[in-house]
Image: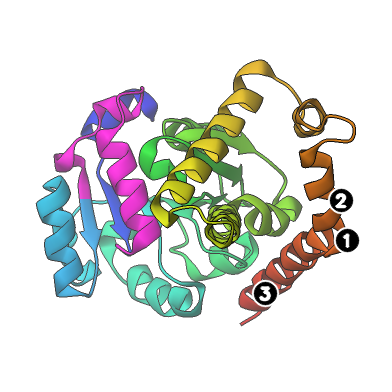
């Protein structure tokens, strides 16, 4: 399929934050195969008129209010909330344009077996768990197949989302944990930055300067880890001089329960994902 992407039609069902991030990432990517995609390749199905206007103005794509306005679909990205997924699929199942598509679901919690039952009988399904940094080409996406996916479908999905950062093919049993870790991870990192900015302000720093320092520190640390191949523990140890300020800070954070808080947060996210999948 990748060699035919220039003529493929991709329908994005749901133009919210994640759907918009995927759309923008693909259109603005200069990495193959996404470099063969342009506004003509996309239709966005989005009920909200203001959002349709926003996406059309930003990317030049066709935006429609209802799926019955779609005349062609080769790949369909399901980017709606889990709570409304099956209502949406019921509508798509009745429309001829969606009868034999490759569906890519990014919905948290909903397993492939439930999705396959609701999709058109001749369609194929791949499940993904991306995160929002794909908008700037630095996403992390997990990909898994289903009972209906054919040879090459996961590879295509990996290739497409690999254009937006990094993508990994995994077993479906790992998806909920991955969603709790990297899917929600940008929010955790942003909350971490917010907390440290507040701490810096209490120590007399200007808030804007403190935030810029922390954003650059997080960006730089991630780049250091990625480009050098060091483990996170190695970087932590390298910065933590014996008897120094960093060790004092880490010890205080540990006593305050920082590690336990992270653990509880990921567990809560996994549980919620499982709850969404059983709705």
**Disc 3: which residue:** 272
For residue 25: magenta?
Answer: yes
Q: How far apart are marks 2 and 3 (CA)?
A: 31 Å
**Disc 2: which residue:** 251
Is 171 left, or right, of 52 in this rendering?
right
Q: Pointer 3 and pointer 1: residues touching (CB < 8 Å)? A: no
The colour style of the image is rainbow
- Which callout, 2 or 3, points at the residue further toward the start of the chain? 2
Assess disc 1: are there few (<14), some (14-19) or many (≥20) residues with their C-alpha within 10 Å of its C-alpha.
few
> What span is in magenta?
15-42
Give the farthest residue toward the front: 204
Q: How far apart are marks 3 and 1 (CA)?
A: 28 Å
Q: Is mark 3 on a helix, strand or loop?
A: helix
Assess disc 3: are there few (<14), some (14-19) or many (≥20) residues with their C-alpha within 10 Å of its C-alpha.
some
What's the residue at 35%, 56% (across, down)?
19
Task: Confirm whether residue 150 shows in the render.
Answer: no
> What secondary structure do most residues of the magenta stretch adopt?
helix
* Image location of residue 139, percent across then percent down: 49, 40
**Quarter assignment of residue 222:** top right
* Image location of residue 211, percent across then percent down: 46, 50
Q: Taking 91 as reference, is 104 above or below it?
A: above
Task: Count how many numbered circles sit on residues in the image.
Answer: 3
Is 236 left, or right, of 162 in this rendering?
right
Q: Which of 78 and 239 is in front in this view?
A: 239
Q: Is mark 2 on a helix, strand or loop?
A: helix
* Image location of residue 147, percent across then percent down: 63, 52
For residue 243: magenta?
Answer: no
Q: Is mark 1 on a helix, strand or loop?
A: helix
Is 114 left, or right, of 229 in this rendering?
left
**Disc 1: which residue:** 255
Residue 26 circle label: none
């Amino acid at each position: 399929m990748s060699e035919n992407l220039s003529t493929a039609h991709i329908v994005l069902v749901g133009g919210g934050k994640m759907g918009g991030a995927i759309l923008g990432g693909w259109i603005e990517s200069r990495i193959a195969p996404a470099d063969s995609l342009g506004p003509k390749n996309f239709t966005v199905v989005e009920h909200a008129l203001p959002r349709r206007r926003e996406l059309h103005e930003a990317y030049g794509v066709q935006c429609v209010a209802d799926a019955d306005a779609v005349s062609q679909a080769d790949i369909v990205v399901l980017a709606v909330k889990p709570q409304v997924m099956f209502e949406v699929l019921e509508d798509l199942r009745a429309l001829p344009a969606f009868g034999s598509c490759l569906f890519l679901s990014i919905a948290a919690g909903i397993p492939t077996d439930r999705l396959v039952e609701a999709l058109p009988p001749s369609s194929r399904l791949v499940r993904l768990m991306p995160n929002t940094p794909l908008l700037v080409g630095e996403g992390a996406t997990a990909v898994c197949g289903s009972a209906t996916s054919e040879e090459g479908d996961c590879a295509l999905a990996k290739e497409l989302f690999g254009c937006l950062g990094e993508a990994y093919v995994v077993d479906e049993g790992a998806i909920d944990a991955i969603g709790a870790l990297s899917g929600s991870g940008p929010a955790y990192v942003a909350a971490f930055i917010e907390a440290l900015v507040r701490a810096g302000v209490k120590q007399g720093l200007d808030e804007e300067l403190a935030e810029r320092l922390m954003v650059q520190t997080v960006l730089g640390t991630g780049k250091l880890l990625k480009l050098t191949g060091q483990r996170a523990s190695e970087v932590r140890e390298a910065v933590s001089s014996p008897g120094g300020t960093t060790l004092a800070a880490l010890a205080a954070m540990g006593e305050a329960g920082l590690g336990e808080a992270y653990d509880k947060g990921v567990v809560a996210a996994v549980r919620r994902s499982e709850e969404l999948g059983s709705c």
